[in-house]
Image (spheres, rainbow, N blue to C red):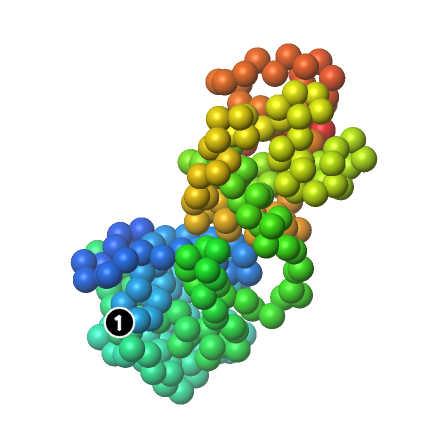
Amino acid sequence: MKRTLLTGFTVLVLCLCAALPAQAARTVPVTVDGVLLSGTSYVDSGATAVPLRALCQALGGWSVCWDSEARCASAERDGVRITAVPGLREIRVDGTAYVSSCAVRVENGCTYVPLRALCEALGYQVSWDSSLGGAAVTTGAEAVSYSQEDLYWLSRVISAESRGESSAGQIAVGNVVLNRVASREFPNTVKSVVFDTKDGVQFEPTSNSAIYDTPTAQSVAAAKAALGGQSVVGACLYFYAPALSQGKWINANRAYFTTIGCHRFYL
């Protein structure tokens, strides 16, 4: 059996890019333990299909390759082997077939596999996340408890403040809000921090009504990641965008930490 790692030309065969299959009804966001899956996922025949490489990267530790002899995609980790044959409505894990209404397919050089069939075969849970408007995979990591009100306001302030930023940049904004909740210097709930006006309006979207806009799927995922404990800016309590503000008070009174995208973060 001839297998090659996905380098050079073979990447074109199994490249899991963001192109949408022509027959897909609609795209949907997918998260793995609260982190938004890269690439484009879509609903096909009532099932969610995802890029195999992106999913394996999110799950961690998998090596993905193309079996040129069998003409199928495969992935291996710790002796477990996944095989996905384009055109078949099944995914195989160690030779056992798991059937789905969604067929494995390759579109524009990208291989898509049925999410639920594969994840449940691996022992993971898949559910529909109504707040995200997409599928959520849980791998068994310790569940994190937070209120829907916290998610509601955190996702909205992240979206309003950093729509278009990277996932890290959006999580960082969420970190600042949650760091304020934990600090004695600020109110002790997400909503009250977002609408805090003690020393003037803290978040501009609360004054221009952008805070009430529906958040993007990426912002919802970033809010969940921040609420789940993912941190990219440590104990930072402040940020500003130099393109929109001079940040005179912050620069004079707080310690600079890092810059992510268009925002500068301060302790």
Q: In this image, 254 relative to 42: left or right?
A: right
Q: Quadrant of the C terminus?
A: top right
Whether residue 224 is situated above or below residue 169 in the rendered picture: below
Please provide percent x and percent y for residue 193: 67, 36
**Is residue 168 in view?**
no
Whether residue 164 is situated above or below residue 110 in the rendered picture: above
Please identify the residue farthest to the right as the structure is shown.
Answer: 184
Residue located at (53% from left, 44% from top)? 155
| Residue 66 vs residue 148, the one in the foreground | 148
Whether residue 14 is situated above or below residue 213 in the rendered picture: below
Residue located at (74% from left, 36% from top)? 187
| Residue 215 vs residue 90, the one in the foreground | 215
**Is residue 94 in view?**
yes
Please provide percent x and percent y for residue 179: 71, 39
What is the crowding at mark 1: few (fewer than 14 residues within 10 Å), some, or many (at least 20)? few
Mark 1 highlights which residue?
45
Q: In this image, 237 relative to 46: left or right?
A: right
Q: In this image, 109 relative to 146: left or right?
A: left
Please provide percent x and percent y for residue 7: 35, 56
Whether residue 101 is situated above or below residue 154 in the rendered picture: below
Q: In this image, 186 relative to 74: left or right?
A: right
